[in-house]
């Protein structure tokens, strides 16, 4: 329990670190706003894709029938689609914060349950959640500042408050879902479908930049980092 709560909090705190990094606005501003920002977004997309492909779908499908896995995966995509539609209508800082919660909370729940079941997937999920929250915090800070709806202090404070939901979600995973592999597997598939929708609907279009190659390479590096972590935890290779 202690390990799950601590790592979920640190993973959420990565949003604050990403926001602090986004405050550096005078370091080659044109490059920072264009190429670097797109590369950061793409890196986050690569990490999310690694979480889906290497952890959520394989671990979730292990305990589910075809109908259960398909229904959970599609249900997650449809739920994220509905949330995305609602956020498009509302806009503002609240929509940005809700977008950050969409993948953070389900992953933290799954991470807590994985720790309780002594699965190595818990540690890998903690690493991937933290890595994805860095670019999400960076991007959300820049977009919220561009909208002019919040001050710097208020944005960082909201990120810090969001990080507290990580331990709460992890506690739910440990206390409620541990020992119940089917509901946990459904949650993983649900999150995987939603995140995959998010990648192709929001992250990949933002990462595209004409005549620049670093954003695409950032996505590859993000996925590669997840793959390396999965192989190290599984004990693969020399």
Image (cartoon, rainbow, N blue to C red):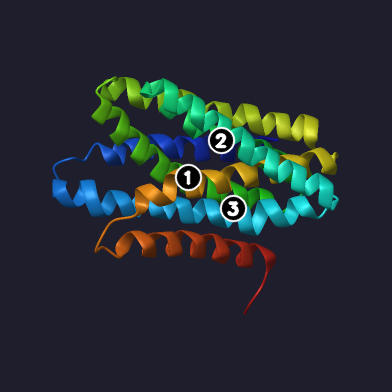
Marks 3/1 in contact by CB < 8 Å: the verdict is no
Residue 218 on image: x %, y %? 38, 60
The residue located at (50%, 35%) in the rendering is 12
User: Element type at marker 1?
Assistant: helix
Instruction: Write down the residue under mark 1.
Output: 201
In the displayed structure, 135 sits above or below 221; it is above
Q: Is residue 106 left or right of residue 10?
A: right
Instruction: Write down the residue under mark 2.
Output: 81
Q: Earlier in the sequence, mark 3 or mark 1?
A: 3
Residue 168 on image: x %, y %? 63, 26
Instruction: Point out which mark residue 51 bears.
Output: 3
In the displayed structure, 148 sits above or below 68; it is above
Instruction: Tell me the quarter of the image containing the N terminus.
Output: top right
Marks 1/2 in contact by CB < 8 Å: the verdict is yes
Q: Residues within 10 Å of mark 1 (few under 14, many from 20)?
A: few
Residue 27 on image: x %, y %? 15, 47
Q: Nearer the viewer, residue 32 or 210?
A: 210
């Amino acid at each position: 329990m202690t390990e799950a709560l601590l790592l979920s909090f640190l993973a959420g705190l990565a949003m604050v670190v990403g926001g602090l990094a986004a405050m550096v606005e005078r370091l080659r501003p044109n490059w920072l706003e264009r190429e670097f920002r797109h590369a950061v977004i793409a890196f986050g997309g690569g990490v999310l894709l690694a979480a889906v492909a290497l952890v959520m779908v394989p671990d979730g499908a292990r305990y589910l029938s075809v109908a259960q896995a398909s229904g959970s995966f599609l249900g997650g995509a449809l739920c994220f689609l509905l949330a995305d539609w609602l956020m498009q209508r509302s806009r503002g800082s609240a929509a940005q914060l809700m977008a950050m919660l969409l993948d953070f909370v389900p992953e933290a729940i799954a991470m807590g349950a994985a720790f309780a079941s002594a699965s190595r997937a818990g540690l890998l999920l903690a690493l991937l959640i933290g890595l994805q929250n860095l670019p999400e915090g960076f991007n959300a800070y820049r977009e919220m500042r561009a909208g002019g709806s919040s001050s710097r202090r208020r944005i960082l404070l909201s990120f810090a408050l969001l990080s507290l939901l990580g331990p709460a979600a992890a506690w739910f995973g440990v206390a409620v879902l541990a020992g119940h592999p089917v509901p946990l597997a459904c949650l993983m598939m649900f999150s995987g479908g939603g995140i995959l929708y998010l990648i192709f609907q929001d992250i990949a279009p933002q990462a595209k930049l004409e005549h620049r190659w670093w954003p695409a390479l950032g996505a590859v590096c993000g996925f590669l980092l997840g793959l390396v972590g999965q192989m190290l935890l599984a004990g693969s290779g020399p």
